Image (spheres, helix red, strand yellow):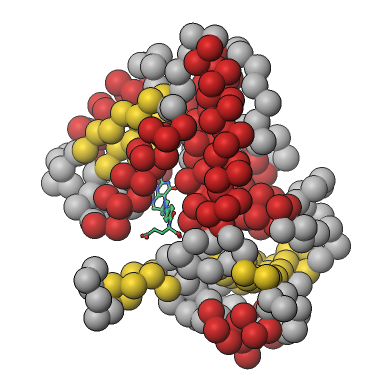
Amino acid sequence: MTTIIDGNEIGDQITDGVAACTDTLVSEGVTPGLATVLMSDDGASETYVSMKQKACEEIGIEGFHHEISADEPAETLFETIDELNADPAVHGILVQMPVPDHVNKRDVLERIDPMKDVDGFHPENVGRLVAGNARYKPCTPHGIQKILAETGIETEGKDAVVVGRSDIVGKPMANLLVQYGSGGNATTTVCHSRTDDLAAKTRNADIVIAAAGVPEMIDGSMLSEGTTVIDVGINRVDADNDKGYELVGDVEFESAKAKADAITPVPGGVGPLTIAMLMYNTVKAASLQSGIDISLP
Ligand SMILES: Nc1nc(=O)c2c([nH]1)NC[C@@H]1CN(c3ccc(C(=O)N[C@@H](CCC(=O)O)C(=O)O)cc3)C=[N+]21
């Protein structure tokens, strides 16, 4: 029987622990604060930012939301970031990606105070992660580590194949998988759009992490029996329903499920963990900035 991993359940479990930490901080006089900044008219981005704000509200984290019109100059965004960096009520800052083309993404990430960079995208935090001394692990790879741990999937000595080399998922995921310690010690291969014979790599894997952003690019024929399949894709494809779209992963679910030992669905797999780990990092940020100890899940 294939285990269909319930990301909502695992996410809720982590969220409970994060909420308990929030209560501790609040009782010590510190309310964790997360600022989200949206500079985009994209419908999906709006949905994700409002999901993040809703999660804050449920946990007791104070949410601050800023919207900047997509045609404003980059300087407007930088000024907003500067204000949030200086605001002691704001412990975490998330600038929703992607930003408009006329705004340099690297300049945005470097503008955020590394202590408030709860995405873990600032070069200082990327460097710490690669050095094995992470401050804020990027939310999606960290969430995937939690999924594997909660599902009892050992990574040590296993062949892990990461499909995709993005700065926000593929690269940090591969880094975490090769590190010493639990959730690491895997033999890790990073595949991407220029990989020759991708199927040969994925068929050799014990764990496949699909994070390429290409709808249903991995199917059952590319997998061996007993593989663990983690699907990071959240692609909106046109559909004949009320919303006008449906979500599909980077994995063709039915054929992959027939081969897999365990698989994450889309939606309800990795996505909820991304949000849970953002809350986790925000509470960690409040702890680091206030000097109040908490025990995170
Ligand atoms: N600075 C920054 N940080 C991010 O973390 C970030 C970002 N920019 N830009 C966009 C992506 C995307 N992202 C998602 C998080 C949760 C779900 C999620 O929970 N999805 C639900 C379904 C959502 C739906 O129904 O549309 C699920 O998979 O079950 C999806 C997508 C965070 N991102």
Depth check, front residue: 123 or 154: 154
Q: Which corner quadrant holds the C terminus?
A: top right
Depth check, front residue: 191 or 208: 208
Task: Please tell me which residue is depicted at 77% across the width and 58% down the height of the picture.
Answer: 152
- On screen, 36 above or below 60? below
Q: Residue 214, position in %: x, y?
A: 44, 74
Residue lying at the far top in this picture: please name it: 29
Task: Please tell me which residue is depicted at 62% across the width and 64% down the height of the picture.
Answer: 5
Q: Which corner quadrant holds the N terminus?
A: bottom right
Task: Please tell me which residue is depicted at 54% across the width and 30% down the height of the picture.
Answer: 19
Task: Please tell me which residue is depicted at 53% across the width and 12% down the height of the picture.
Answer: 27
Q: How many numbered discs, if any? A: 0
- On screen, 295 above or below 254? above
Position of 265 with respect to 158 (left or right) is left
Q: Residue 240, position in %: x, y?
A: 24, 81
- On screen, 152 above or below 240? above
Depth check, front residue: 108 or 50: 50
Q: Residue 112, position in %: x, y?
A: 41, 30
Position of 32 with respect to 291 (left or right) is left
- On screen, 295 above or below 155? above
Q: Residue 288, position in %: x, y?
A: 58, 20
Residue lying at the far right in this picture: please name it: 157
Position of 287 with respect to 224 (left or right) is left
Visible residue check, residue 112: no
Visible residue check, residue 32: yes
